[in-house]
Amino acid sequence: MATKVHMEALSPTMEEGRLVKWTKHEGDAVKSGETLAEVETDKAVMELVARADGQLIKVMVPEGTTVPVGNVVAWIGKPGEKVDGAGSQESGAGAAKAAPAAAEPKAAPAPVRTPTAATPAPVSVPAEATRVKASPLAKRIAKDAGVDLKLVQGSGPGGRVIKRDVEGGAVQAQAAAAPAPSSRLPTPGVPYEDIPLTQIRKTIAKRLVASIGPIPHFFLTTEIDMERAAEAREALNRQLGEDGGKISFNDIVIKAVALALVRHRACNAWFQEDHIRYWNDVHVGMAVAIEDGLITPVIRNADIKTLSEIGAEARELAGRARNRRLKPEEYTGATFSVSNLGMFDIDQFTAVINPPEAGIVAIGTIVPKAVPDGDRVVVRRRLRVTMSCDHRVIDGATGAAFLKTLKQMLENPLAMLL
Amino acid sequence: MASQFDVIVLGGGPAGYICAIRSAQLGLSTAVVEREKLGGVCVNIGCIPTKALLHSAYIASLLKESKDFGVEASGVKTDYGVAMKRSRRVSDQNSKGVEFLMKKHKITVIKGTGVVQPGKKVKVGSDVHDAKKAVVIATGSRVKGIPQIGLEINKTTVISSDEALLLERVPDSLAIIGAGAVGMEFADIFQAFGVKITLIEALPRILPIEDAEASDVLTKSYRKRGIDVIAAAKITKATVGKDKVTLDVEAGSEKKQVVAGAVLMAAGRAVNTENIGLKECGIQLTDRGFIKVDKNLQTTAPGYYAIGDVAGPPMLAHKGFREGAVAAELIAGQKPHPIKYDNVPSVTYCHPEVASIGLTEDQCKEQKLDYVAGKFPFSANGRARGTGETEGFVKILRDKKYGEILGAHIVGAHASEMIHELAVARENEYTVEEIDLAIHAHPTMSEAIGEAALDSLGRVLHI
């Protein structure tokens, strides 16, 4: 069967794209991953790639045409295969989202959790792509309770949603169980898990937004003793010698944040209007100041990268960020962010959350301070860290538990090896 | 001679033999230990022979009424001995069928009484067999008397179903104690063979676990046939003689003396947990004497499973079948769908038959559920009128808010066959509306199910 080629959302904000040039033509053989066309987005000229192997059997859109995201622009199939010419009329939000997610199973990337420089920007699974299997009774209960069956994990045969999956208590219990602060990341395999908003979370979301803008922030500050982290850093940099890139405090903070997120999945999440998406991978956004603003390149899978890898990647990304050479997938898809103004001698500040992420930590400068040590006073290098939390996702205790782990990691860097 | 198997099943009744077949299907080497005939109580002295006798009873009662249908049968004689022998042949055929199934699946059948031993071993006679993966206990249950009131089974005047199934001749009169499925079915059988029956039930109504309306229909039907039905009865004294039994019975304010040629004990069963080595293996029992199992049918000793009657109520062959299959799948490392114990159909094969699934109306009330009862009588059903089997009804208890089928009760001819529409519906969480949407063939008894569903929605068509 022939496969549709959709206009894909090549940047997070792209709604339509102008087909600048077809690099493959009707009759050309194409392989999955090969460039088919150049498309001008709202930000840059990007490449539209094939998601299937075969022959480009039909081009639906001439060069120069502006096409809404999700529309069919071509077909890939077997030579001589007939296709439905009306396909170009297809549109709708579902189709638009479908494209970058590689709706055709053939092109779907295997969900293996390995550190990669840039995995494709994560997008939501299209609603229409998932046919909901649910019992008639479950459908009725869900309709009445306003539960979106697409977001419910079915426990019946073949994952069918049944009564107990949608009953009032069950939905809340399910939602409450996943973001429990102590829960570790589940076994790898799926990129994330969507948990529908419970009534209490819906109310929290509504009430707090009314109070403090669209994202109800709250802030938690803690002071961290960086003496041992500093010693560790000096030792590691001595070990790396002159040739290797140096490890910065920022790299250590990113690594510690990533590891703390692994232990506090409740903070590694996106607020998604009717559900919360708990990510199984940890992608840390790193705020970088650029000439007329700021951008947050993403260190993907920072929890499983070494400090040297994080350091090298952070430097490389920051460099290209300043030169505005980042690709969209390199500055989107973070699951949590770090903002560091330590180099500007800021003791402490509050960072603004980068939605849909639910949290960000603001890193101040490390200053020597007199602190009590038993009945003596000693001078220690101290760091003030402030976490901004989206209260719709993270509650005070949840954020505090995360910060406590982060503090423990930085105060005893050996803990990061655990 | 001792040998080693992956799975050793103790008991070749319904739960045990199905467990063995499913284990073998999953590639496990399997042995079944059975001291009597394969098929257990069900095949040999339970479900199967009684169904044969009930059909004899049905033919006898049909012939009594056949004149109305334009078929006159004169000189109709009944002979329980002949009916009994036919029922034995049916049982033997079924037991041989189980033997064949064991051979087909290359399951080793070990004849003898098995005793479980620590270390997943089963001793039969002097041989000790090893189970590499699991020992499954499926030793079933047996009839029991009530020695507390002087009614110990003596196999002559105080009998159980075991003896009733092997009688050459029927007594003139029979008192049946217990009006659950067993008591109801034997009352039906023996009444048709000309025995004067007194049916005595301690609880307030016969068929006490069924819906109260089912009990009402059966009470009327039995009384009409001349069966003396005494519910809420207390036996204050039992005098067991050489050829008769005298029972002093109190029911409410009434006192009555029942004299019968024999008493059939049909009040409950005892599970076979004695002398099979449970304690030595650390296998615990529940307060009620069943083997304690978790939701994966595991006993308190790792590697030992229990299924069927010994593992707890309901003591029904079809519940045992399912547990047998599920246990085998668990042992093989599969993840079977959990058993829904609230969706096990219950059937009594008396005439008219009684079949039910889920909650009774009284249970809905006790649980304070917001429900609507939809009901359709067979007297308004064309097919039932045609066959003259207009007794009974279909009742569906619908949850008011979502239409969930909380319970369903069928009293009438073929109720045992019709209940499965509701079993499938409940298993798949269909609501009354899906029942209605499924087109029911006309004319059938099953139409009454569609009509009862409609009645629960206030839209019944044929009344």
Image (cartoon, coloured by chain):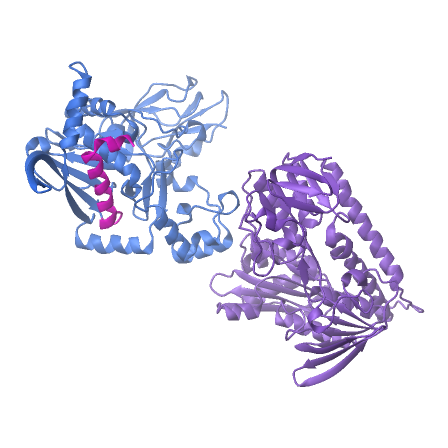
Dominant SS of magenta comes to: helix
Residue A213 is covered by the magenta coloring: no
In the image, A149 versus B187, the foreground residue is: B187
Query: Can residue B115 be seen in the rendering of this structure?
Result: yes
Q: Quadrant of residue B121?
A: top right
Above or below, comparing residue B404 to residue B332 in the picture: below
Percent x, y of residue A45: 25, 24
Picture mark count: 0
- The boundaries of the magenta stretch are A391-418
Chain A rendering hue: blue
The quarter of the rendered structure image containing the C terminus of chain B is bottom right
Left of B239 or right of it: where is B292?
left
The quarter of the rendered structure image containing the N terminus of chain B is top right
Q: Residue furthest right?
A: B75
Residue at 65 percent of width and 60 percent of height: B346
Residue at 64 percent of width and 39 percent of height: B7
Percent x, y of residue A291: 10, 28
Residue at 11 percent of width and 36 percent of height: A382
Q: Residue furthest bottom?
A: B253
Residue A408 is covered by the magenta coloring: yes
In the image, B242 versus A216, the foreground residue is: B242
Query: Can residue A333 be seen in the rendering of this structure?
Result: no
Chain B rendering hue: purple
Percent x, y of residue A92: 36, 40
In the image, A271 versus B341, the foreground residue is: B341
Q: Quadrant of residue A403?
A: top left
Q: Quadrant of residue B83?
A: bottom right
Percent x, y of residue B48: 76, 55
Left of B341 or right of it: where is B445?
right
Above or below, comparing residue B238 to residue B138 in the picture: below
